[in-house]
Image (cartoon, rainbow, N blue to C red):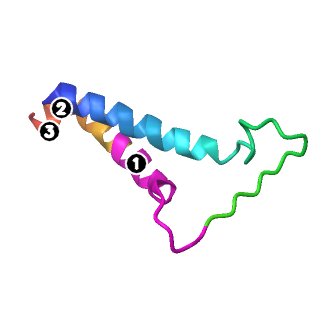
Amino acid sequence: MSKILLIIGIALAVTGALMFISDFLPVDFLNQSSEESYLKIEASNSFSLKSYRLHFLVVGILFLLAYKFKNVIDF
C-alpha cells in the first residue's frame, strides 16, 4: 500500500508540475517558427486536463505526505 502511495504521488506531482511548466513554452515550440508567441488561445467550453493541473499537483503532494507519514496514519 505504501509503495502505491509513493508511485501515484510522484506521478501526479510530476504531471502537475509539467503542466505548469508547459505554460511557459512558446505555442509553436516544436515547429521552430521565427516569431515566438506565448499567447495560448483555448475555447472556454472545451474539456482540458490543463484545467486540473493544480488538482494533480496538490493530490500528488498529499499522497507523498501520506507516504512520508505512513507510520502516523498507520498504513
Residues at circles 3 and 1 in contact by the CB criterion of under 8 Å: no
Residue 3 appears in the figure: yes
Q: Is residue 42 magenta?
A: no
Mark before the other along the chain sequence, 3 or 1: 1
Name the mark on residue 73. 3
Q: Magenta part mainly helix, strand or loop?
A: helix
Q: Which residue is mark 1?
A: 56
Is 4 left, or right, of 21 in this rendering?
left
Residue at 65%, 48% in the rendered image: 23
Q: Which residue is mark 2?
A: 70
Q: Secondary structure at mark 3?
A: helix
Q: Residues within 10 Å of mark 3 (few under 14, many from 20)?
A: few
Position above or below: 4 against 37: above
Q: Picture coordinates of residue 21 (x, y %)?
A: 61, 41
* Residues rendered magenta in the picture: 43-60
Is 41 left, or right, of 60 in this rendering?
right
Q: Residues within 10 Å of mark 2 (few under 14, many from 20)?
A: some
Residue 68 appears in the figure: no
Measured Cα–Cα span from mark 2 to mark 1? 21 Å
- Foreground: disc 3 or disc 1: 1
**Depth order, front residue of 52/30:** 30
Q: Is residue 46 magenta?
A: yes
Residue at 29%, 35% in the rendered image: 8
Is 42 left, or right, of 32 in this rendering?
left
Q: Picture coordinates of residue 15 (x, y %)?
A: 45, 39
Q: Secondary structure at mark 1?
A: helix
Q: Residues within 10 Å of mark 1 (few under 14, many from 20)?
A: many
Q: Picture coordinates of residue 55 (x, y %)?
A: 40, 54
Give the residue type that dot 1 points to.
Answer: Phe
